[in-house]
Amino acid sequence: MVCTGCALLCDDVEIGENGCRHACRIGDAHITSTNQIDPMVNQSPVDMDAAIKSAAEILVSAEKPVFVGFGNSVTEAQATGIELAEKVGAEIKTFHTDIFDDILDGRVKTCTLPEVRDYADVIIFLGCDPMNTHPRLLSRYAYYPRGEKRQHGWEEDRTAITIDLRFSHTASICKEAYTIDPNRQIEFMDALMDALSNKVPKTTYDKKRILKLAGTLKKAEFGVIFAGTGASAPPRDAIIRLMDRLNESSDFRLLPLAPGYNLRSIAEQLRQLHNRPGDDGDGGSDSSSGGSGMDLHEADCILCLGFDLMNSLPAHGINGKMIVIDPNETLTSRYADVVIPCAAGGIDCAGSAVRMDGETVEIPLIRESERLSDGAILKQLLEVV
């Protein structure tokens, strides 16, 4: 089966009577989850038809609807969600897709995960902690495995470096770890770029360590930056500037480590729809309606598709009616006006997804259930609104 626990989409997971083989702790929890929800309207149990009808009524009456999420849905459901958003005049906000837009726009070079395994000799984990977000990244691709040109693996052939706001679990296995002040990230990035240009950096950080880091990066034959997409990651423009500077003397590629197993797919679809990169100035939003980028507190209806909005943003900033379509109970589902349970991609829903490096992966289901897929629910809403 293909595990949809994260954007690695590991295809070697096996399901047996005694649990999952080869799955990481995130994948195992995802596959074996029993935290399912029931259809609800105003926190009261209803049947599916009533929940879908109530959701349709809210969408029809909404003047400023916004759809959020999409990263945990198969590609086919995402396409239906875009069609529904266009029909009701909703804006789609996808979080953490800004770096994908830069890759799709050709502003930065990228590569595939097998290329990381086969060729990468210097790897930077920038504002991310894959041991806790993408646990099998290091063992399958980024550090431990032997590759075509890296037969000696991490012992001799690879140098792993973390640059983060804290000393993470990933930092504990890296040869170099740089902990930076959250209020001085730009200062660190500028100092590193000075060092890459053979200048003594003007900074309060340890100049010798930054010069040493620059020397390591300039010697890279095939470098890869795995960049985080959350609050701990440096600003988007700083990452682009760093990539440009690195590629003046080395060969570096960028891969985003974003939450959601299919975020790259929705970024690709929205970009194709508008033929332009998404407007991610507020933390990652793409507009399916070509709007100006409405704030969520302005929305009178918010549809959360496989996304726990209240676990990401303060609840006091959300004033509109809330519709949740999700396989599992979330903080948002507890307070939503309408809750519609759906099948989970890769569990009881089949489809396709785009891996974080751009490879399309077919996702079979592993067990049948009576739950409707999110795509089927969106199609029903599309027919009645």
Image (cartoon, grey):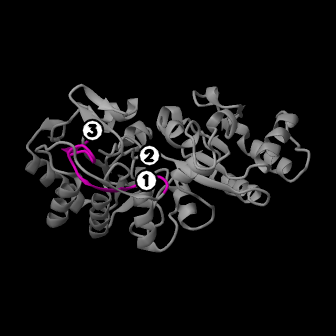
Seen at 85% across and 41% down, the residue is: 211
Pick the front one: 23 or 69: 23
Q: Residue at x 32, y 35 (%)?
A: 30
Q: Earlier in the sequence, mark 3 or mark 1?
A: 3
Q: Residues within 10 Å of mark 3 (few under 14, many from 20)?
A: many
Q: Which residue is mark 3?
A: 333
Residue 332 lies left or right of residue 126; in this view the side is: left
Q: Amino acid at mark 3?
A: Ser
Helix or strand or loop: what does disc 3 sit on? helix
Alpha-carbon span between mark 2 and mark 1: 6 Å
- Up the image or down, 357 lies above or below 181; here it is below
Is 368 or 114 nearer to us in this picture? 114
User: How many marks on residues?
Assistant: 3
Q: Position of residue 200 (x, y in %)?
A: 91, 45
What amino acid is found at the position of numbered circle 1 in the picture? Arg
x, y (%) of residue 257? Answer: 52, 46
Check contact, mark 2 vs mark 1: CB within 8 A.
yes
Q: Secondary structure at mark 2?
A: loop
The image quadrant that residue 338 belongs to is top left
Q: Crowding at label 2, few (<14), some or many (≥20) Cα neighbours within 10 Å?
A: many
Q: Is residue 87 left or right of residue 312?
A: left
Task: Give the residue number, with chain letter if any, for mark 2.
Answer: 8
Residue 92 picture location, percent across and down: 38, 59
Q: Check if residue 347 falls in the magenta segment.
A: yes
Q: Quadrant of the N terminus?
A: top left
Asked if 145 appears above or below 97 in the picture, the reply is: above
Q: Which residues are magenta?
A: 334-357
Q: CB under 8 Å between callouts 3 and 2?
A: no
Q: In the figure, is residue 221 to the left or right of 53?
A: right
Residue bearing the label numbered 1:
355
Q: Is residue 113 above or below residue 286?
A: above
